[in-house]
Amino acid sequence: MTALFSRPGVTVSEENATLLVAGDVDVTLAADLAASGVKWLKQTELTTISLDFSRVEKASSVAISVLFEWLRICRQRGIQVQAILLSAPLRRLASLAELDALIEQPATTLAV
């Protein structure tokens, strides 16, 4: 596991072609948190990755925003997103925003 970002209460790391977010993502950390993933995505030579937000326990539009930023970079770089994992609170929020298809089948949805 490679740590990419660490602040009290939130971390971003890379493990086995997966960007992992853990902790409570809030607006004060969003830009730095997103930037850490963007930097890694721009440097990686991987062509397929997963995004794991399953350890984010609070539903937060900020976490969803970070996810979208990373998806945008993946699309720009031609990186296929194999899976998006969300915690139960984030899954409920994503469902309310009608993002179910994107979360369940990111490769298919992003290819359109």
Image (spheres, rainbow, N blue to C red):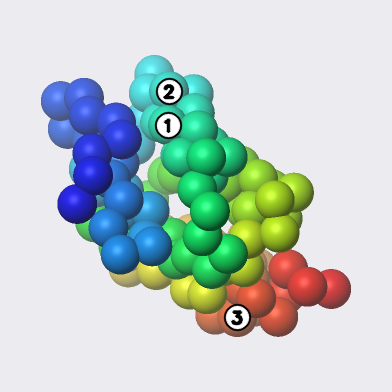
| Amino acid type at image mark 3 | Gln
Three-letter code for the amino acid on which mark 2 is drawn: Asp
Q: Within 10 Å of the Cα at label 2, are there few (<14), some (14-19), or many (20+) other Cα atoms?
A: some
The x, y position of residue 50, in whole percent, is: 45, 66
* Residue farthest along the right direction in this orientation: 112
Question: Given contact means CB atoms under 8 Å apart, are the residues at marks 3 and 1 in contact?
Answer: no
Q: CA distance from mark 2 to mark 1?
A: 6 Å
Please report the residue visible at 22 percent of the width from the left and 29 percent of the height from the top.
6
Q: CA distance from mark 2 to mark 3?
A: 27 Å
Q: Determine which residue is flagged by label 2.
A: 32
Which quarter of the rendered picture does the C terminus lie within?
bottom right
Circle 1 SS class:
helix
The tag on residue 109 is: none
- Determine contact: label 2, label 1, CB under 8 Å: yes
Q: Nearer the viewer, residue 7 or 88?
A: 7
Q: Residues within 10 Å of mark 3 (few under 14, many from 20)?
A: some
Q: Residue at x 42, y 31 (%)?
A: 36
Q: Is residue 95 visible?
A: no
Alpha-carbon span between mark 3 and mark 1: 25 Å
Q: Which mark is residue 36?
A: 1
Write down the quadrant of residue 75 in the picture. Answer: bottom right
Side of 104 where 36 appears, left or right: left
Give the side of residue 55 with respect to residue 104, left or right. Answer: left
User: Mark 1 packing: few (<14 Cα in 10 Å), some, or many (20+)?
Assistant: some
Indicate which label's residue lies in the foreground, 3 or 1: 1
- The amino acid type, in three-letter code, at marker 1 is Ser
Please report whichever mark, 3 or 1, sits nearer to the chain's N-terminal start: 1
Name which residue lies at 21% across and 24% down.
7
Of tags 2 and 1, the one toward the viewer is 1
Q: Which residue is under mark 3?
A: 105
Front residue of this view, candidates 59 and 6: 6
**Residue 4 percent coordinates (x, y):** 31, 35
